[in-house]
Image (cartoon, grey):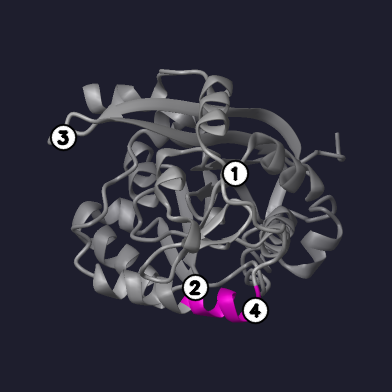
Amino acid sequence: MEEEVAYYSKDFDWNDLREEVESAQDLARVEEKAISSEHACTAALAWEKFHSRHSQGIFFKERRYLLKEFPELGRSNQEFTVLEVGCGAGSSAIPILRATTTARVYACDLSEAAVSLTNKMGEKALNEQAKSRLWTFVCDPSCEALPAWLACDACRASDFGIKSSLVSCCEGGADFITLIFSLSALADLDQMSNLLKECCSVLRPGGMLLFRDYGLYDMTMLRFPADQKVAANCYRRFDGTLSYFFSCEAVRDLFTGAGLLEVELEYCCIKLVNHKTKVPMKRVWVHAKFMKPDHTK
């Protein structure tokens, strides 16, 4: 329980950290530019290899803190649909399905190995009733459309306003979309923008997009050597995967640019201590909730 509580505390002020970092070192300046298509393709292949390498699922932990960060996902008095984009090993989908008997979770990832791993972890961790509420599929919404069975063209075009309850051509969209440490893997602002617009097109009016990802000046960012920086706030790991570190301003611009309304947006600043070295670690994540306007009201 103590480990979970740490996720919700505010151990330090982000502005103090920013001043500390900017006064202590001259961060390598890289011209703001989009990652090339070659880099993006290489990163996609790298994620496939990553999930194949960790196919036993031992590397991943369930994100049980999500239900405290986003209590909307734990409501149990009515049915609702969640679309998880970038499902990885199912670390977010499984806690949601466990927390309620009414949620349906559609989980997708650009990596076939990740989707396979989500199914494998679900088989191990969920009871039969919960497993029946999990659907997985391979898709990269940054460059392709989400499937029509999730939300048909007529629903998207009309913003779901004229969909009849008698029509069963699709699921009618999602009540919630989760982006949990997945948008940063794209590391290209144009791709991120495309993904958010596609997600918004299948989000029901009044629905919410729930976001958590790496924040600017997170310890991980500061540990990257300069030669692994490939664009502003973007770094390439040794395994070829990319990681982008967000400012709250960048998140606001991306999400409102997709037509969403800001509900919550803040830095989550946590001080952890390495149990072996006793070295303190300052972690920074961005927490956000955005809502799709409901023009039918």
Crowding around mark 2 (Cα neighbors within 10 Å: few <14, some 14 to 19, many 20+) is many
Residue on which disc 1 sits: 246
Residue farthest left in this picture? 276
How far is disc 3 from disc 2 in space, using C-alphas?
32 Å
Q: Disc 4 on helix, strand or loop?
A: helix
Whether residue 1 appears in this view of the structure is no
Q: Would you say 65 lies left or right of 139 here?
A: left
Q: Tell me: residue 138, above or below residue 58.
A: below
Which percent across, then down, holds residue 261?
Answer: 76, 36
Residue at the spot of label 4? 37
> Which circle marks residue 43 in the picture?
2
Q: Is 7 above or below relative to 105?
A: above
Q: How far apart are marks 2 and 4 (CA)?
A: 10 Å
| Mark 1 residue crowding within 10 angstroms, few (<14) / some (14–19) / many (20+) | many
Residue at x 42% of width, y 71% of height = 240
Question: In the image, what residue type sits under mark 4?
Answer: Ser
Q: Where is residue 177 in the image (x, y as percent from the top left)?
A: 58, 49
Q: Mark 3 points at which residue?
A: 277
Mark 4 burial class by Cα count in 10 Å: few <14, some 14-19, many 20+:
few
Alpha carbons under labels 1 and 2: distance apart: 18 Å
**42 within the magenta span:** yes
* CB under 8 Å between discs 1 and 2: no
Magenta residues span 36-44
Residue 180 location, x and y as percent? 48, 48
